[in-house]
Image (cartoon, rainbow, N blue to C red):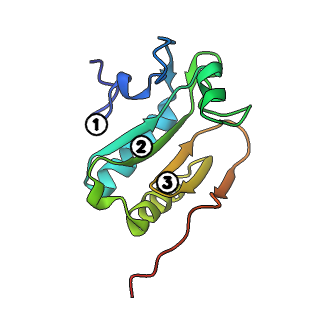
Amino acid sequence: MTKLSKHFSQSEFECRCGCGCEVVVSSDLLELLEEIRVSVRAPLRITSGARCKKHNASVGGAKESWHVPRDNTLYAADVTYWHSRSIDTLGIFQLYTLADMGHASGLGIYPGWIHVDQRPTKRARWIDKNWHWVDGS
């Protein structure tokens, strides 16, 4: 297991289809994920890192998804908590807010996770149609 940083290893970012495509995780992405991890003081799980084009298509990813490496560099990850007790609306919104404060280039919020990327192009923000704020009062 190759450690990339204090809290993340190379295997967490590998394509889930088992194709073995090798990628270098963008240092900006890794730094942002570390900042978020330290701020929440809880383990985070990368649910999707690199995707080869075939795997990206199979999961319904955008044709120009930042999960698909460019020049062997990965710029995107989908992130959630390891412990299910933290996967609630407030917990996910906290991840989103920390990523935004950390100057994520691309940032989306979904039920149960966020997408974060450090694309070298203009900023993008979105909310999945299935995400909604649940008021606990």
Question: What's the distance in space between the residues labelled 3 and 2, CA to CA?
Answer: 8 Å
Image side of residue 43 versus residue 89, left or right: left
Disc with the residue nearer the chain's start (3 vs 2)? 2
Name the disc covering residue 59, or none: none
Residue kind at label 2, given as amino acid type: Leu
Q: Which residue is mark 3?
A: 99
Nearest to the observer: residue 38 or residue 9: 9
Disc with the residue nearer the chain's start (1 vs 3)? 1
Residue 22 x/y as whole percent? 49, 13
Q: Residues within 10 Å of mark 1 (few under 14, many from 20)?
A: few
Question: What's the distance in space between the residues labelled 2 and 1, CA to CA?
Answer: 9 Å
Residue 92 x/y as whole percent? 43, 60
Tell whether label 1 touches label 2 (CB within 8 Å). yes
The total number of labels drawn is 3
Question: What's the distance in space between the residues labelled 1 and 3, CA to CA?
Answer: 16 Å
Q: Which residue is mark 1?
A: 7
Q: Residue furthest bottom?
A: 137
Disc with the residue nearer the chain's start (2 vs 1)? 1
Q: Quadrant of residue 39?
A: bottom left
Residue kind at label 3, given as amino acid type: Ala
Image side of residue 61 versus residue 95, left or right: right
Q: Which residue is mark 2?
A: 33
